[in-house]
Amino acid sequence: MNLIRLISVVSILACTGSLQAASNDMKGLAFSNPAKQMKMPAGWSTKTVQYDKQINNADLVISFGQQTYPALHKLVENYAKDNNINIVIQSGTCGVSAGKLLRKTLDSGTFCCPPSDRDRLPGLEFHTLAISALSIFVNEKNPLQNISTTEARKIFQGKIRKWNEFAVADSFNSNIRPHIRLHCKKRPGHWTLLLKNQEQFSPLLKEVGVIPDLVAKVGQLENSVSLETPYMVNLYRKEPVKMLKVDGHSPKDIDYVASGKYPFYRTYNMTTWSNGGKQKQAVIKLITYLRQHIEDKHQQYSMVPVSKLKKAGWKFKGSELIAEPNGKKLAYYPPQH
């Protein structure tokens, strides 16, 4: 290899490495450190769960969020009926679950993302149900079929502003209108794997509060784009929308998402109390049931079940998913300098 060619190759590799480093700098943390725990006032840890006054004769009280309620609440209702137990299912968000767990009015709270440090209350245990890819989806009239991870980030940063900047969409001469639901801003994972904080998003970004409205916006606006799981997109689509491949891979490709190479995903967790007694055992049985259902029906939900995560090398602490498979360092540790 002559000297000029050698210099060219080295330059290309250096640029590639710089682009990769820049891309990684945009990505938020995938998980929090499970060793951390919130400090609570004296006596808090010994308090038992006390349901809200309006709840009578419940065997279990659990809270589901915008993701898990539509997917799983009917399943839990049938489980309760079959096992002759009274399960009160409340609907809310990760923040609602966190608040009720803080007040100890729940036997189990459900999260659509990994817990933050502030969610790790004394005696609270997290159990991962599955993960699901977050799809980049657009209006059906958009000619685009595939984007790279870097292009996805540039779209939501506002660095790519027109669809015809993509060669395959050269006739689609319109400004890009990104929409997103910036939920759980203090928690790791989910949309922070696209861009680590709100300040990195385009000033043209339109925030949408609930998932049905988010999907509807993309269906109504030909130039829009957003981010959500395949199950939610399919559940709420009324107008034609489509999910793009990312780096050549569909967000519904379960095995590829399980490999850890798909860049954006959501993590589903349920909680138990370490001193929950009979209620803890009842919640554990429910979690086991839900996990098995997801194992059996994972294609239906576009979820990667626990068995596939473990086989692919994702790291667990007990029952909680705590790190991706690709990397020697755990994702929640700060970089060493």
Image (cartoon, rainbow, N blue to C red):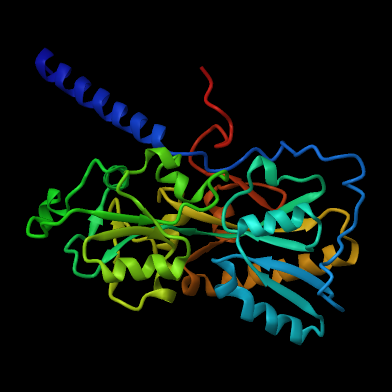
Q: Report the side of 171 relative to 232 (left or right).
A: left
Q: Image quadrant of residue 80?
A: bottom right
Residue drawn at x 90%, y 57% as measured from the top left: 48
Residue 74: give x, y in percent of width and height: 62, 81
The correct choice, above or below, for 25 with respect to 180 in the image is above
Residue 325: give x, y in percent of width and height: 52, 44
The correct choice, above or below, for 130 with respect to 203 in the image is below
Q: Nearer the viewer, residue 161 or 245?
A: 161
Residue 164: give x, y in percent of width and height: 12, 53
Q: Image quadrant of residue 72?
A: bottom right
Residue drawn at x 61%, y 40% as measured from the top left: 32
Q: Residue furthest top?
A: 3
Q: Image quadrant of residue 40?
A: top right
The correct choice, above or below, for 27 with respect to 268 in the image is above
Quadrant of the frame with the N terminus:
top left
Residue drawn at x 91%, y 39% as measured from the top left: 42
Q: Residue furthest left?
A: 171
Q: Report the side of 333 relative to 218 (left or right).
A: right
Q: Report the side of 99 relative to 17 (left or right).
A: right
Residue drawn at x 55%, y 37% as measured from the top left: 331
Residue 242: give x, y in percent of width and height: 29, 68
The correct choice, above or below, for 174 with respect to 81 in the image is above
- How many tags in the picture? 0
